[in-house]
Image (cartoon, grey):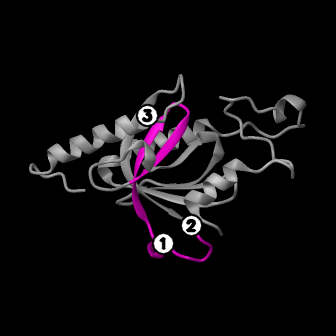
Amino acid sequence: MMTGPDNLGSVRASMQRLTSAAEAVLVPGERLATTGIGWAAQLRPRVPVLFLGRRQHWFALTDRRVLVFSRHRGGPGPADLVLAKRYSFFTLEKVHRHRPLFQIRIRGANDSRLVLEFRPGQRSVAAELVARLTRALPPARSEPTAAAHATMPGDARPPAPPSDAEPDVDRDTATAFWGEH
C-alpha cells in the first residue's frame, strides 16, 4: 500500500471503511480493538512459505475474535468478511519478529495451518494478535467434566467435538477460508 502524500486521503478512507465494516459484524457487547493490513496464506506440507499464494487482507481485532476481510480498492464492506473466529479457535505455533515482515503461524481447531505476515508499519496489529492468541490458550487438560463439554454462546472455550449427527460449522467455515487439504 502506497502512503505518499497523494494517497494519504484514500488510505484514511479505506481504514475508516474497515472500521465501519468491522463494527457492522460485531456481536452485542463486542468491542473493536485495532485494525490493520497483512498477508495470509494456508500452509501446506513441504511447501516453503515463499511459494505460497499469499493474499493481502484487512484485519480487525476485537476483544473476542479476529475478523479478516478480503482486500480490494476502496476498503472492505461487511460482505467481504472471510473469517471471523474466536481467539481460542487458534493455537499459536511460531512467531518471527526479527524478519522484515512480522510472521505469525497459527493452527486452527480443524488442524488447518495459516501464516500471517505484517509489514513494519503494522507490527502493532501483529503484536496485539499474538498477545490475544497467547491469552486465549486453553487451560491444561485434566479429567473432562460435564461442564467442560457444555458450550454456551459467548463462551471462550473451544467447542466440544461434534457428534456424527450434527455438522461441524467451524470446520466448514475454516474450509471456506483455507480450502480443503
Q: Residues within 10 Å of mark 2 (few under 14, many from 20)?
A: many
The answer to which image quadrant residue 101 occupies is bottom left
Q: Nearer the viewer, residue 34 or 139?
A: 34
Residue 165 belongs to the span the image colors magenta: no
Within the magenta stretch, is there residue 60?
A: yes
Q: Of all residues shown, which one is farthest toward the top?
A: 29
Q: Which residue is mark 2?
A: 43
In x, y percent, where is residue 16? 29, 37
Q: Secondary structure at mark 3?
A: helix
Q: Residue at x 18, y 51 (%)?
A: 3
Question: What residue range appears in magenta?
Answer: 44-70
Q: Residues within 10 Å of mark 3 (few under 14, many from 20)?
A: few
Residue at which label 1 appears: 52
Q: Earlier in the sequence, mark 2 or mark 1?
A: 2
Say the numbered circle drawn on residue 24: 3
In percent of width and height, residue 115 lies at 51, 60
Per the rendering, the mark at residue 93 is none
Q: Is residue 87 above or below residue 165?
A: above
Q: Is label 2 in a helix, a strand or a loop?
A: loop
| Residue depicted at x 36% and y 55% | 71
Q: Residue at 75% of width from left, 40% of height from top? A: 159
The residue closer to the viewer here, 177 or 93, is 177
Whole-angstrom CA distance, mark 2 to mark 3, is 30 Å
Residue type at mark 2? Leu
**Is disc 1 placed on a helix, strand or loop?**
loop
Q: Are marks 2 and 3 in contact (CB under 8 Å)?
A: no
Instruction: Residue lying at the far front in this picture: please name it.
Output: 79
Query: Can you give x and y, in whole percent of width and height, for residue 144 in the image?
Result: 88, 37
